[in-house]
Amino acid sequence: MSTTWAAYRRARRQSRQAWALIALLVVGAASGLVWFFAQGQFTVSEGPGNGPSEAPVVNPAWMKTVQAVEAIPTGLAVDALDTLPVKGRAAKDDYRREEFGQAWLDVDRNGCDTRNDILRRDLESVEFTAGSTCKVASGTLREPYVGHDVQFRRGSESSAAVQIDHVVALGDAWQKGARQLTPKQRQSLANDPVNLIAVDGPANVKKSASDAASWLPANKRFRCHYVARQVSVKVAYRLWVTQAEKDAMRRVLDSCPGQQTIRAS
């Protein structure tokens, strides 16, 4: 079988074009993966654009502040971020929730446990169970992580719709300095209202013990407050950040250069 020189050149040209197209597709796919893992995974999961941009901290009418290890400085959150040590994660195999004390203690000694304090602080149209001024029975949450209103009703099958999230997850805190705190200091960290927000239950489960490098709220409007709150907690309890975490926090704070630290008063 023979071929003409013109046909041979045409075949070679088509082959080069095909290989160029394949190379372009490979480069595009690689760039897409880099974007996704650096930023896109948070962008594609964004919630509605009308969710809340902040969450309450302390209602002084009936809540008291918790004694942290360090005072949270006033000023820009990004400046506070730069004061945090950068280290790798410590091992997590010895983490136990009990290291942070019994769940939902009345640490501020106002007569109500922490979980009900936060529900009362964050919910609207709150109703209490009969005969109680502490135990929250129902209410509406203008949820900050997903940006939708969530109804809370106390019950074995309904309470999980609203959960109390540790902004700096206790498992993350344990790997980044909390094991060096005293038991009382860890107890304060677990019950500090600066580190607690009522949120959508499924969103809280999805977050688990993630830091800012691997999880951010779908509600983009809340991210600056969320990261500033994480930075504030880590300063208050002498915790550190990983380099990837610090980079992720800085990307968020760069979008809101005036964001302040979050303080209880």
Image: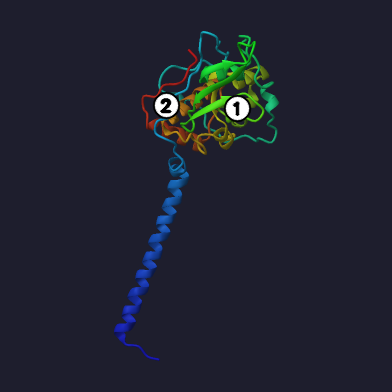
| Residue at 44%, 54% in the rendered image | 30
Image location (x, y in percent) of residue 170: 61, 28
Q: Secondary structure at mark 1?
A: loop
Image location (x, y in percent) of residue 100: 66, 23
Measure how far apart labels 1 and 2 are at the Cα level. Answer: 29 Å
Residue topped by disc 2: 53
Question: What coloring was used for the rendering?
Answer: rainbow
Direction from residue 171 to residue 26 in the image, left or right: left
Q: Secondary structure at mark 2?
A: loop
Q: Quadrant of residue 88?
A: top right
| Amino acid at dot 1 | Gly
Q: Quadrant of residue 163?
A: top right
**Quadrant in the picture for the N terminus:** bottom left
Mark 1 touches mark 2? (CB < 8 Å) = no
Residue that protrudes farthest toward the left in the picture: 6
Relative to 54, does residue 30 appear above or below in the rendering? below
Residue topped by disc 1: 177
| Residue at 57%, 37% in the rendered image | 206
Q: Nearer the viewer, residue 207 or 90?
A: 207
| Amino acid at dot 2 | Ser
